[in-house]
Amino acid sequence: MSYKETYARAKADPEGFWLDAAKAIDWDRFPTKALTDTGGPLYHWFEDGMVNTCWNAVDRHCEAGRGSQVAIIHDSPLTGTTQKITFDELRNRVAQLAGALRAKGIEKGDRVIIYMPMVPQAIEAMLACARLGAIHSVVFGGFAANELAVRIDDCQPKAIIAASCGIEPGRVVHYKPLLDGALELSKHQPDFCVIFQREQEVARLEEGRDVSWYGFQYGVEPADCVPVEGGHPAYILYTSGTTGQPKGVVRPTGGHLVALNWTMKNIYNVDPGDVFWAASDVGWVVGHSYIAYGPLIHGNTSVVFEGKPVGTPDPGTFWRVIAEHKVRSFFTAPTAIRAVKREDPKGEFVKQYDISCLRALYLAGERADPDTIEWAQRILDVPVYDHWWQTETGWTIAGNPAGLEALPVKIGSPTVPMPGYDVQILDEAGHQMKAGELGAIAIKLPLPPGTLPTLWNAEDRYKKAYLSHFPGYYETGDAGMIDEDGYLYIMARTDDVINVAGHRLSTGGMEEVLASHPDVAECAVIGVSDDLKGQLPVGFVILTKGVNRPHDEITAECVKLVRDRIGPVAAFKLAVVVDRLPKTRSGKILRATMVKIADNQEFKVPATIDDPAILDEVRDALKSIGYGV
Ligand code: COA
Ligand code: AMP
C-alpha cells in the first residue's frame, strides 16, 4: 500500500488500522477495541487489552527461535570494550533482576527511577521494571543532583537503580555521589537503591539502603512477565517545559508497543534480525523508543553506544561502528553529524570503512540544516531522512515512511505526517492556514497510539499546556508550515524551550536558577544560534542595587550555579551583566527580539517596546561576548 493510501486508511478507520497493527504484538488478552473516547479531550488506546512489554521485547523472540540472535551490542570506545548479549541471555538477566526487585517488594504500578549511563544494565533495568509492570523513570546522567531530586519528589519511586559512575571524555561522572546528593535534597526517600558498580569507580554503599546489583540478585527466583492493561503506564519520562518544574510524560503500554513496532519497518525500514542503531542516550526519548524498546520489540539487534561522535577516538567512530556491527539503519541528531563534519569536512574517515551495509541515516531531535543533510548524503551515499517528533509523542509525527514508500526528500522538510497524525497549521485564533503560511503546528485529537495520555500526577497541567490553546487539538509548541505537496516544515518553538545539541532545555528553568543568585535582581535567558549545537543559552543579569563586585566574578558564579543546579547538559557558559532589559510597556521581556540581535538577523522594533534605546545596550552586551557583531 502506498503512503497516501495508508495515511487515508488510518484516518478513515483508525479502529481497523490500529487493531490490525496490534496483531503484530503478543497480547495476553487482545483488545476488543482500539480507541476509548472519554468524551474528549482525553483519549486512551487498547484499554481492555492485557499485555507485557518485556515479553514482547524479549521472551517472545526466544520462544520464536531467535534466542541465539544478538539483542544488544554494547560498543564503548570510552572503556575500550564491546559486549554482545543474545535474546536468551537478555531474558535470563532481566528475569533474574526482576525477581530480585520483586523480592524487595517492587510490584505493578510502583515507580522505579533509573539513573545510569550507556551500559546494557540500563536497558536491563528498564525491561525488568516492564516485566513486573513497574513504571520506570530514567533520568539522564548529565543532570545535576537537584534535577534528580525534583524527579524523585514528583514520581516518588519505591526504588532507585543507579550505576556507580558514568564516563565522559576525560572525566568520570560520579553518579553515586550525585544520587546521594539528590536524596539529601528530596523529601521523598525510596525503600532501597540498587547500585551497579562499574570498575572505573566503585561507589560506597549506604548500609540499610543500598544494595549491589549482583549481590541482591543472589539466590532469588527469576520473575515471569506480569500482564498489564493496555493503558497502564509503561514509563514516565521528564522533559523540559517553560518552567523549572519538568513535565512527566506518561507512556501507555499498549499503544507504545503497537506504534513502535509499526515504525521499525514502515519508517526505519528494518526487518527482524537486522542491526539498528540510535546514537542517543537512554535518558532521552530517542533512547527509550529506539535504543531500548522499538528495536527489541521488533526483533532487531540494538547497538548501545557509549561514546561521542568525535574524540572517541576520532570522527570515524560512527563509521567504524556501522561497519563492524553491520548497521542497516542509523539514527542520530544533526549536532552529532555537524561535530563529525567539523573535524573531517572531506569525509576522509568514511573511506577507511566498508559501510555498504548502511541503507539510510535518520536525523531528529532538532532542526536539520541543509548543509548537514547534503554533506551526510554525499559522504555516506545513502538517503538522509529528517524526521520530527517529541518526547510527548514517543515516535515520529512527520517523517519519510521509507519502508512503506520512500517519498522524494525535500531538504528542509521532515516530509509528511505519519498515519494517525492529523497535522494542521493554525493561526492565533485557531483557524486553519493556507498552504505555505506560517503558523502554530497543532494535531487534531485524538493523537495516535503510543503518545502521551496525560502528565504524571498533573492532568490539569496536561490540559492547560497542550489542549487548551486550540480546543480539539494538541498544541505541539512548534511553529511551521505545510506546502502544496503536504510536506511539513518546522521553523521554531513558540515557547521558551530551546534545543541545545538535540537536548531540550527550558530557558525559564535557567532563569529560576539565576534569579536565586543573591546579587541578581532580574534576568533573562535566551537561546542564540550556534554552528555546532544548534542553539546555546545566554544569560543576561541585572544586579541588585549596591552590588559592586567585578562583573566577571558574578557571571562566573552564575555559570557555576546553573551547572550545579541543572547540570552540565545545560551547556550554560555565557552570561553578561546589563543595566536594563528590553520590555514591552506591560513588562514582558522581549526575548525574541534579543535573539534576533544575537543572531544578527533583521527585525522590526516591536511597537509595544517601552524604551527602544535598551536594544542598543543589549547589542553592546552581546558584542562583549562575541555575539551579534
Ligand atoms: N553524563 C554526564 N555529563 C554529560 C552527559 C552524560 N550522559 N552527556 C553530556 N554531558 C556533559 C558533557 O560532558 C558536557 O560537559 P562539559 O561542559 O564539562 O564539557 C556537557 O554535558 C554538554 O554536553 P553536550 O552538549 O553533549 O556537548 P559535548 O561538548 O560533550 O559534545 C557533541 C558535543 C556535539 C559531540 C555532543 O553534543 C553530541 O554528541 N551530541 C549528540 C546529540 C545527541 O545525541 N542528542 C540526543 C538527542 S537525540
Ligand atoms: P524532545 O522532546 O527533546 O525530543 O524535543 C522535541 C522538540 O525538538 C520538538 O518540539 C522540536 O522543537 C525539536 N525537534 C525535534 N525534531 C526536530 C526536527 N526534525 N526538526 C526540527 N525540530 C525538531
Image (cartoon, rainbow, N blue to C red):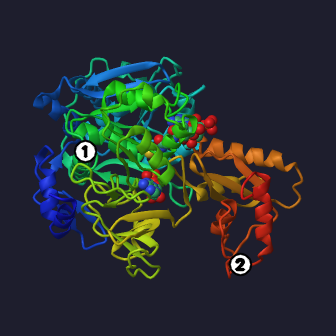
What residue would you read off at disc 1?
269
For residue 3, above or below residue 335: below
Identity, as a three-letter code, of the amino acid under mark 1: Asn
Residue 211 shows up from this direction: yes
Closer to the eye: label 2 or 1: 1
Q: What element does badge 1 sit on? A: loop
- In screen coordinates, is 544 left or right of 176? right
Quadrant occupied by the N terminus: bottom left
| Mark nearer the N terminus (2 vs 1) | 1
The residue under the point 41% across, 76% down is 426
Rendering quarter of residue 618: bottom right
Percent x, y of residue 352: 43, 25
User: Dot 1: within a 10 Å radius of its alpha carbon, few (fewer than 14), some, or many (20 or more) residues?
Assistant: many
Identity, as a three-letter code, of the amino acid under mark 2: Ile
Residue 184 shows up from this direction: no
Q: Could you give the CA–CA distance between mark 2 and mark 1, rounded to whole angstroms?
A: 51 Å
The residue under the point 53% across, 20% down is 201
Kindly identify which numbered label has been placed on residue 192. Answer: none
- In screen coordinates, is 122 left or right of 183? left
What residue would you read off at disc 2?
609
